[in-house]
Image (cartoon, grey):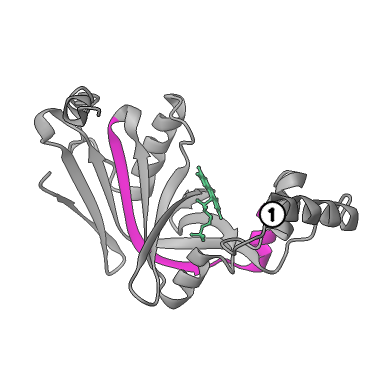
Amino acid sequence: MTDSSKWFESLRVSYEQGELNESDITHNPFEQFNLWLQDAINNDVPEPNAMVLSTVNKQGQPSARNVLLKSADENGFIFFSNKTSDKATDLKHNPHCSLLFSWLPQHRQVIVKGKAEEISMQDSNSYFQTRPYGSRISAWVSDQSKVIKNREELEVKVKEFMDKYPENVPMPSHWGGYLVKPESIEFWQGRPSRLHDRIRFTKKANNWTIERISP
Ligand SMILES: Cc1cc2nc3c(=O)[nH]c(=O)nc-3n(C[C@H](O)[C@H](O)[C@H](O)COP(=O)(O)O)c2cc1C
């Protein structure tokens, strides 16, 4: 049997990639977010726009999964998905959710808490039409989160929809974007000896208050 305690001990890393000081941080959390996202892109972090979306269903059961961020500005954070998926059903009952970005090569994470709402069909469609052909076909094929018999079932449906839409693929009505409007955004920078820097922006009456949180 593996001695896993030794194994985990060998994984111990001292976080020495940087600091996060009140004097350096921008006073606009979206600007700060985009600076860190840009850093992650420049440093070749894999899938830098991947974020863990956590939702809670009607029974209080939380679920988490990765989705891709497609826009981040003053309005909030946008991702796209199937609107009959488990995540969509959760959000319909309970729009409160969180987003977690892990930029581990830089020992950074960002945690967003807020509420999700559907974006307009028109805005979803503008993005949908920029997606590669195969991804647009998949949006028709996948009854996301539902049990299917086997892989073949998907392949058959791909062929069906490619025959139906050989060129122009309309956006299915069960597909679209969600905007997560943040209520708080925390920036976390790993520091040596686990004395990390945590700076949290919280929205109060349309202004952002900035607080340092104990690591
Ligand atoms: C890196 C990565 C990015 C993903 N991006 C998306 C995405 O943008 N939208 C999406 O619906 N699913 C995306 N997925 C798949 C989801 O993690 C998930 O399997 C799917 O959305 C079904 O989730 P649900 O059953 O909880 O609704 C991604 C998975 C990974 C690993």
Q: With 165 as the anchor, is 136 left or right in this view?
A: left
Query: Who is closer to the viewer here, 118 or 137?
Result: 137
Q: Which residues are magenta?
A: 107-128
From this viewpoint, is residue 141 visible?
yes
The residue that appears at 41% across and 63% down in the rendered structure is 181
User: Is 120 on the left or on the right of 138, as rendered?
Assistant: left
Residue at position x 19%, y 26% from top?
Answer: 12
Q: Is residue 138 magenta?
A: no
Classify 10 Å Cα crowding around label 1: few (below 14), some (14-19), many (20 and above): many
> Mark 1 is on which residue type?
Phe
Q: Is residue 56 above or below residue 78?
A: below
Residue 22 in view (yes/no)? no
- Judging by the rendered image, the residue that carries numbered circle 1 is 128
| Residue 13, image x, y percentages | 20, 25
Q: Quadrant of the C terminus?
A: top left
> Please, is residue 1 above or below residue 82 in the view?
above
Q: Nearer the viewer, residue 69 or 64?
A: 64
Q: Nearer the viewer, residue 208 or 215?
A: 215
x then y, percent, for residue 184: 29, 58
